[in-house]
Image (cartoon, rainbow, N blue to C red):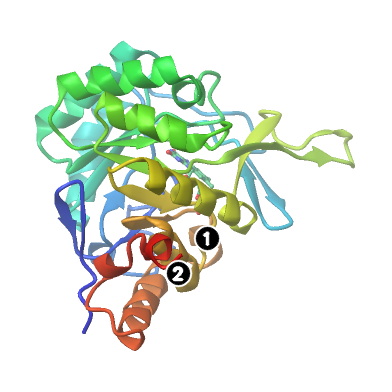
Amino acid sequence: MPDLSVTLAGVKLKNPILPASGTLETVDTPMLAGDLSQLGALVNKTVTRDRRDGNPPPRVWETAAGMLNSVGIPSIGIDEFMKGGLPRLRARNDRIIVSIAGFSVREFVELAETVAAAGLADFIELNLSCPNLESGVLWSTDSGLLAEVVGGVRRAVNVPLIAKLSPNVTDIAEMAAVAESAGADALGLVNTFRGLAIDVRVKKPALGNTTGGLSGPAVKPLALYAVWSSYRRVRIPIVGMGGICSWRDAIEFMLAGATAVAVGMYNFVEPGCMWEIRDGIDRYLAENGFNGAKDIIGLAHRNQ
Ligand SMILES: Cc1cc2nc3c(=O)[nH]c(=O)nc-3n(C[C@H](O)[C@H](O)[C@H](O)COP(=O)(O)O)c2cc1C
């Protein structure tokens, strides 16, 4: 039996499969198609300091090979999350990634301090890349701001930090290097790609927010390249995501350099897919004679 465990920034995960932030409901619901404790870690929908409603509807729009969303981070606010959401997540898995977004460096730091003080998070993920907030992608498309926010949080807390970056840049490997130098322990690659749909019936943008973020199969080769190029540039581990729908996709991301892989949009299409992907990785490793998942991380670079 291959060993599915991987180590992400010094923290052992039982397997490399995670939900991508914002795409898995973790309260009990008939939508849940598997045992949450069997995933590598759980990730909350990004939480903000204050309560927020998010963007006006429609918030999702189907495209030929993916989905545009402009959800815009509706949030219960950090206080409610710390009281209810976080302890509930913790009860469902022994590894928790808490995703936060601030509207200033100070807010990011305060959110991280609040999360760290509770001692329930194994990682803090800085959502530096939401295309549906006015200043959302600025954090990881401006290298000065990126260094400032990652550095600020780094100096404030000891919890391992994942910097989740936007693909809406010319050279994501460059931004990955900035995040690494500023003290990130891992990278989340990638968030959604800014896009647009127009509803021809009403002859105006289809989404209430005008633009949205594209994810799903359409973005997989783009996201895979982001992981590939960043892996060559930095030493910190990468959580790869963007269009993962099958165990083959997940294996591609790991061969390209991802230590763990997150599934987003496809959770809405096939709610049991993360558990199937885990089993598929297991079979692939066994059939190809690998001892464990860690043996294939970045292997495509060495086989070139
Ligand atoms: C409906 C929806 C909501 C999302 N909400 C968040 C969020 O709150 N925080 C975040 O960092 N990313 C969010 N994302 C981005 C995903 O976590 C992921 O980075 C992206 O969708 C790429 O993966 P995918 O192609 O598998 O969907 C969201 C994506 C979708 C589709």
Identify which residue, 264 or 258, lies in the foreground: 258
Indicate the position of residue 124 as horizontal and vertical percent values. Answer: 25, 36
Q: Residues within 10 Å of mark 2 (few under 14, many from 20)?
A: many
Residue at 72% across, 52% down: 63
Q: How many marks?
A: 2
Residue at 34% across, 70% down: 34
Left/right of residue 63 with respect to residue 224 in the rendered view: right
Image mark for residue 266: 1
Identify which residue, 114 or 284, lies in the foreground: 284
One can see residue 135 in this view: yes
Name the outermost residue toward the bottom.
287
Question: Looking at the image, is 129 positioned above or below residue 44?
Answer: above
Task: Name the secondary structure under disc 2.
Answer: helix
Indicate the position of residue 285 as horizontal and vertical percent values. Answer: 32, 79
Indicate the position of residue 244 as horizontal and vertical percent values. Answer: 50, 61
Residue at 20% across, 74% down: 3
Q: Quadrant of residue 152?
A: top left
Labels 1 and 2: the sequence-earlier one: 1
